[in-house]
Image (cartoon, grey):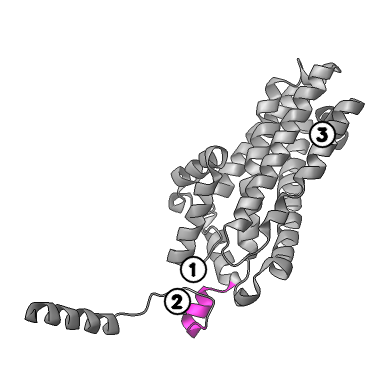
C-alpha cells in the first residue's frame, strides 16, 4: 500500500512537471502562440517552407506520395486519416511535402503526351496542349475551385462553437489535388485505350463507354472532395457537397438520350486549343 501511494504521488508530480498536450493546448490548437511559434505557423511561413522543399528532391517522400495515390483509388478515407496525424504532429492540415504535387505533375505530362499521340498531334501541338492542361486545367482551375471551396467552407460550414478554427487554403488545394488525380487517370490514361476504336466511332456503344468514364471520373472527384471536408471535425453539413451527384446523373442520362459524346467534345476542344 505504501508503494502504491508513493507511485501515485510520483505520477501526479510528473504530470505537473510535464507540458500539457491537451487539444486545447496553444501548441496544438488555434489558440495564442508565442511570438516565435506564431511566426512559424503563419500561412506565409508554411508556404515558404513548402516552396523551398519543392526544389529539394532528396527531402521529398515519394514513396509515401505514391502510397497516397494508390489509396485514393482503393481507400481514400485512409489518405485523409493521415491528414489527421499531420494536424496532431505538425499543427497543420495541409501537406508540407510537395512530393505528391511533383508526382501528379509527372502523371499529367505523361498522360497529356499520350493524349496528343492518340489524337495524332504534332510535336509543337502536343507541347501547346501540355502547357494548357498543366497551367489552365490543373493549376488555374485548381486555384479557382480551391479558393471557392475555401471561402464557402469557412463562411457557411464551420460550426458555431468552432469559430476559432478555419479551413486552411493549402488544405483546400490539397483536397482538389486528391480529387483531381483519379479524374486525371480515368480520363487521360484509361480512356486512351478506347478513344479511337470505341469512343469516337459515333455509335451508341461509343458514347456509352465514353460518357460512363466521365460519370465515374467526375463522380469520384465529387466523392473525394466530400471526404476531404467531412474529415475536418469543425465543419458541419458537409453532405451538401454530395448534392452535385443529382445533376451529374441527370446530365449523364440526358447525354445518352441525345447522343452527346463528351469525349468527342473534349477532343474537338483540345484540337481547337492547339491551332
Front of the two marks 1 and 3: 3
The residue under label 1 is 91
Q: Nearer the viewer, residue 15 or 36?
A: 15
The residue under label 2 is 27
The residue under label 3 is 252
How crowded is the residue under tag 1: few (<14 C-alpha within 10 Å), some, or many (20+)?
some
- Residue located at (49% from left, 68% from top): 91
> Is there a contact, CB below 8 Å, between mark 1 and mark 2?
yes
Q: Residue furthest right?
A: 258
| Place of residue 167 in the rendered image (x, y in percent of width and height, measured from the top left) | 63, 66
84 relative to 60, above or below:
below
Question: Is residue 33 magenta-colored?
Answer: yes
- Counting residues from the N terminus, which is met first, the one under dot 1 or under dot 3? 1
- Residue located at (79% from left, 23% from top): 208
Tell me if 139 is positioned left or right of 41 in this view. right
Q: Secondary structure at mark 3?
A: helix
68 relative to 33, above or below:
above
Boundaries of the magenta span: 32-42
Disc 1/disc 3 C-alpha distance (Å): 42 Å
- Residue located at (76% from left, 56% from top): 144
Can residue 53 be seen? Answer: yes
Amino acid at each position: 500500500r505504501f508503494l502504491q501511494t508513493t507511485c501515485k504521488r510520483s505520477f501526479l508530480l510528473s504530470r505537473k512537471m510535464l507540458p500539457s498536450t491537451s487539444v486545447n493546448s496553444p501548441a496544438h490548437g488555434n489558440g495564442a502562440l508565442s511570438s516565435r511559434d506564431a511566426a512559424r505557423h503563419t500561412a506565409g511561413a508554411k508556404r515558404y517552407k513548402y516552396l523551398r522543399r519543392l526544389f529539394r528532391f532528396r527531402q521529398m517522400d515519394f514513396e509515401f506520395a505514391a502510397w497516397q495515390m494508390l489509396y485514393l483509388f482503393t481507400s481514400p478515407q485512409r489518405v485523409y486519416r493521415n491528414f489527421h496525424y499531420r494536424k496532431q504532429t505538425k499543427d497543420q492540415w495541409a501537406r508540407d511535402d510537395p512530393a505528391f504535387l511533383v508526382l501528379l505533375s509527372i502523371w499529367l505530362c505523361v498522360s497529356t503526351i499520350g493524349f496528343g499521340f492518340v489524337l495524332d498531334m504534332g510535336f509543337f501541338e502536343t507541347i501547346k496542349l501540355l502547357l494548357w492542361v498543366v497551367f489552365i486545367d490543373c493549376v488555374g482551375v485548381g486555384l479557382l475551385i480551391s479558393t471557392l471551396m475555401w471561402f464557402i467552407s469557412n463562411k457557411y460550414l464551420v460550426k458555431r462553437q468552432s469559430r476559432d478554427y478555419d479551413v486552411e487554403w493549402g488544405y483546400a488545394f490539397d483536397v482538389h489535388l486528391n480529387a483531381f488525380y483519379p479524374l486525371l487517370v480515368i480520363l487521360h490514361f484509361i480512356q486512351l485505350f478506347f478513344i479511337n476504336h470505341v469512343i469516337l466511332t459515333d455509335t451508341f456503344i461509343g458514347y456509352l463507354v465514353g460518357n460512363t468514364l466521365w460519370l465515374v471520373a467526375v463522380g469520384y472527384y465529387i466523392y473525394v472532395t466530400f471526404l476531404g471536408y467531412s474529415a475536418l471535425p469543425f465543419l458541419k453539413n458537409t453532405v451538401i457537397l454530395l448534392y452535385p451527384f443529382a445533376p451529374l446523373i441527370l446530365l449523364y442520362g440526358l447525354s445518352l438520350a441525345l447522343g452527346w459524346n463528351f469525349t468527342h467534345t473534349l477532343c474537338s476542344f483540345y484540337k481547337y486549343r492547339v491551332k
